[in-house]
Amino acid sequence: MPWKKRKQAILKSLPSGVDDEAAKQILNEIVVQGDVVHWSDIAGLEPAKKALREVVVYPFLRPDLFMGLREPATGMLLFGPPGTGKTMLARAVATESRSTFFSISASSLTSKYLGESEKLVRALFSLAKMLAPSIIFVDEIDSILSQRSGSGEHEATRRIKTEFLIQWSDLQRAAAGREDKDEKDGRRGDASRVLVLAATNLPWAIDEAARRRFVRRQYIPLPETETRAVQLRTLLGQQKHSLAEADIQKLVELTDGFSGSDITALAKDAAMGPLRSLGDALLMTKMDEIRGMELSDFVSSLVTIRPSVSKSGLKEYEDWAREYGERGG
């Protein structure tokens, strides 16, 4: 069914208590046909991919196998330094599990009108159940579910957090011990899977009640040596270059402490090297006459492109992961 017709059908059959305008607004946040990302597009992070398969992909595709003690979690947190691939992992999960993907940010759930934000949260969870299996992906979750303080916190902000936590708890109660039967193949299991998948760079800022609901807390660290090598080879595969395997290994050593996005930024800057060396002559130079990328271009770019995560900042993530999370890379 085309998405427009399906959307109209959904709006006509909304559950009682769900605001029409709030539902329309939430439906506009659904990523129906966005970037299709597969596991193979993400270098490394094998433990994180394995955990996401267990928590999301397999239960969504085979609900009959995941009942009772194998009932999947309704919340998973991806945390770690900026630029390590958390959002990309979420997109890959949506693609691989063939689920409806709600991409939500703090601005999606806030309104200047009193009580509107709570309606949006209620509509979000109701629609997620209707369009199940679905993933509610909340990027920078700390901006929505930060720790509730006694003073200095706006009443509206507190109400959004409370409503989000209540709706999330209802989701867990609805999933527990429920069985549906598919008449086509006789499989049993709950097909109405809804997962709250969140990403954050500040896991210690999340409210304790929210942290408890994230049964799986996956640490996405900076890329390891082999992952950096794979990423560099992938990036260079799209460009004319003269780098040998020894040059790539040298680059892997030079990029220690770089995040995935830092390495991409470095490669983009280095790709400008052949053009920079031409100066104004590039305006009259043919495409096939421009030289390929060299190791010297990367070395020059390393002067301006530096790691975005400090050693002290990295220690904070490691400490939090040791106490509350599980390593994902």
Image (cartoon, grey):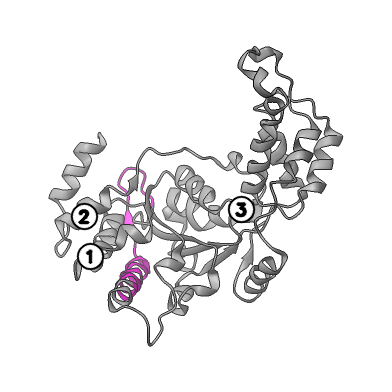
> Which residue is the extreme one toward the bottom?
150
Residue under numbered circle 1? 112
Q: Quadrant of the C terminus?
A: bottom right
Of circles 3 and 2, the one toward us is: 3
The local secondary structure at tag 3 comes to loop
Residue at mark 3 to residue at mark 1: CA–CA distance: 34 Å
Q: Closer to the camera, 312 or 30?
A: 312
The magenta segment is 161-187
* x 60%, y 70%: residue: 325
User: Tags 3 and 2 in contact by the CB under 8 Å rule?
Assistant: no
- First in sequence, mark 3 or 1: give its number: 3
Of circles 2 and 1, the one toward us is: 1
Q: Quadrant of the N terminus?
A: top left
Q: Position of residue 139 (x, y in %)?
A: 45, 58
Which numbered circle lies on residue 23? Answer: 2
Residue under numbered circle 3? 84
Q: For the residue carrying disc 2, how many other residues have a C-alpha within 10 Å: few (<14), some (14-19), or many (20+)?
A: many
The local secondary structure at tag 2 comes to helix
Q: Is 110 covered by the magenta stretch?
A: no
Q: Position of residue 241 (x, y in %)?
A: 74, 25
User: Tags 3 and 1 in contact by the CB under 8 Å rule?
Assistant: no
Quick check: 59 left or right of 237? left
Residue at mark 2 to residue at mark 1: CA–CA distance: 17 Å
* x 28%, y 79%: residue: 155
Residue at mark 3 to residue at mark 2: CA–CA distance: 33 Å
Q: Closer to the camera, 121 or 289?
A: 289
